[in-house]
Amino acid sequence: MVMHLVFWQLKDEALGRDKDENARLIKDGLEGLVGVVPGLRQAHVGRNENGGPYDLALAAVFDSAAALHAYETHPAHQQVRALVTQVRLDRAAVDFTAEEEL
């Protein structure tokens, strides 16, 4: 199992919408990929409750690293990514295998 964590800082306004509207569209788009993208088990998107530079986060669970790599180029994901790219100021991501020991 691979965890994919992504954090975004969103623009205050983009594409004629405010930050909250764009956050909702991102949430709906990414969570809607479960059952569409093979190997994507779960996707949860939420607002940052702690303040700081990032507004929105994705926590996604994939069957394998191969499934995560396939997700990156899947056409349905590419549609959501196109929106995110236009409404974000910054992005950070971390991927890790959940079974690994530290």
Image (cartoon, rainbow, N blue to C red):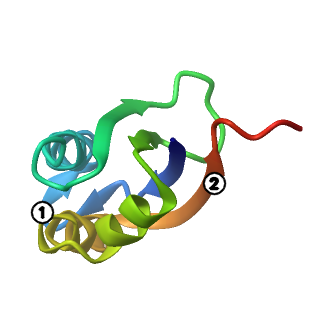
Snapshot quadrant of residue 73? bottom left
Tell me the amino acid under the disc marked 2.
Answer: Val
Secondary structure at numbered mark 1: loop
Relative image position of residue 2 (x, y in whole percent): 53, 46
Relative image position of residue 17 (x, y in whole percent): 15, 55
**Which residue occupies the foreground of this view, 49 or 67?**
67
Tell me the amino acid under the disc marked 1.
Answer: Gly
* Left/right of residue 31 with respect to residue 9 in the rendered view: left
Q: Which mark is residue 16?
A: 1
- The mark nearer the N terminus, 1 or 2, is 1
The residue indicated by pointer 2 is 94
Residue at the (28%, 58%) spot, across then down: 13
Relative image position of residue 99 (x, y in whole percent): 67, 36
For the view shown, which residue lies furthest in the right direction?
102
* Left/right of residue 51 with respect to residue 76 in the rendered view: right
Residue at the (21%, 54%) spot, across then down: 38
Image quadrant occupied by the C terminus: top right
Relative image position of residue 66 (x, y in whole percent): 43, 66
Q: For the residues marked 1 and 2, what is the alpha-carbon distance in whole angstroms? A: 30 Å
Snapshot quadrant of residue 86? bottom left
